Amino acid sequence: MRFFNTILVIVLFSSFSWSQYLDMNDITVLLPLPKTGEENLLIKPSDLTRYGELLFPSQKLFVGFELDVQARRTRSTQTEDFRVIGIRVDNFLRQLYINLVWQKLEGGKINKLTAIHSTHTIFELPIFLSKLEELNRKNRRRFSQDRLPLQVNPTIKAEGLKGPYYQELKKIVMAHISPAFKVTFRTSRHNDGMSGFAGWELPINLNQPSINQFSLIPEYQRGEEPFNNWQTYLPFTYLQVINKLYSNIKTVGGFPPYATKNFQPLIENVDVASTLSERELLEMMGRVYMVENPRVIPGVVQTECLSCHFAQQVRMVTFKIRPNIPFVKFADRMVFTSKQYNLQNLNPVQSSNFTIAFGYGLNTPMWSQRVINETADTLETIYGSRIPLSSIKIRGAH
């Protein structure tokens, strides 16, 4: 009987006609900052799945280095103040999964760039999506948010974290989320603000130092580097791990299907845009547009952390430095477009040196064009065809 029920669910799901009640802010949910005393309304590292498992073994992963040098707390408890500030439904090759974005709250504020991402498969995906649609169908009786660009979720911003929308959304997520199959993180050096990235494919051997088990960067041209960026951005203070964190990637953004140049020089020092030739800059911007287009380079499955986080800032600052170069026309075939969903970018600091793709920087909400495009691409995946969707662990998926 159980086998029959499973087959029935798959058949129903493969032929289900979605009502298209989901929009940009329904599947990429940036939460408003909690009021003082409301921090525990957000998802915590100690929260359990419906089967009683931790979302990820945070106290055993983050040892051997410090997420926040100034916190002066034992390394086994340094994730205690992290909370989920962003919830995303993402996709790769019609596999849907949940990304949780964790940042550190201090007195209702976020003052550090440090962030953790955990990636989870979805139990009973058809039921999960049906619940999301029903939640948002009811929500539209009270709030109209169709065709709105990505922003702090407007319903939760209006109702607060104690309101019915967030409370129901959290219940849905926690009822259908699996333990993480990937955890990545970003941390920053306090002396100069340089950032670094690292991460693990789970499970790892929890009896061995987690710092020796970093995953490799998944990219078109697979290399031997762990999740991190250029050596000038090394985040760690412990000399014994420095040799593990050097990176010699020569193809930022993955091995391209077009004749474009990597934009590593612009990441290292965007001022070189004033001296590079027009052709070189056009080709570099072509690679930037590729990184921002999930149809060309589908997520961190085929590129590394650094490119997705730096692409928007590199593009915007380069446009300011060389405004007379026809970047958009040159890269037209690589730019992501959507006829159905609103791709407007309301990020208030797009051209700043903040390279947060989704979350908060010094209490300012931020989202990158890549995240906006991924959100539209996921919606088009859900509603675009009748090919069955599923949710499985995908190596390399971000």
Image (spheres, rainbow, N blue to C red):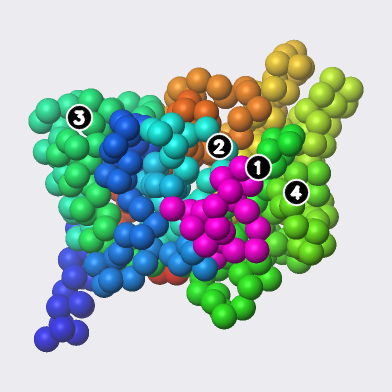
Give yes or no for contact between labels 1 and 3 (Cβ–Cβ under 8 Å).
no
Q: Disc 2 residue type?
A: Lys
Marks 3 and 4 sit apart, C-alpha to C-alpha, by 41 Å
Residues at marks 1 and 2 touching, judged by CB atoms closer than 8 Å: yes
Type of amino acid under label 3: Glu
Q: Which residues are magenta?
A: 61-80
Q: Which residue is painted at 19% across and 37% down in the image?
A: 162
Query: Mark 4: few, some, or many residues within 10 Å (few <14, many ≥20)?
Result: many
- Between 222 and 190, the one nearer to me in the picture: 190
134 versus 142 height, above or below = below
Cα gap from disc 1 to disc 2, whole angstroms: 8 Å
Between 229 and 115, the residue placed more toward the observer is 115
Kindly state the secondary structure of the residue where label 3 is placed. Answer: helix
Please give left or right for residue 132 compared with residue 389 in the image.
left
Which residue sits at x=62%, y=22%?
A: 351
Which one is earlier in the sequence, the residue at label 4 or at label 2? Answer: 2
Q: Earlier in the sequence, mark 3 or mark 2?
A: 2
Q: Indicate the position of residue 172 as horizontal and vertical percent values.
A: 22, 54
Examine the rendering and report whether any part of residue 303 can be seen.
Answer: no
Q: Residue at x 47, y 43 (%)?
A: 104
Q: Is residue 128 left or right of residue 357?
A: left
Magenta-span inclusion, residue 266: no
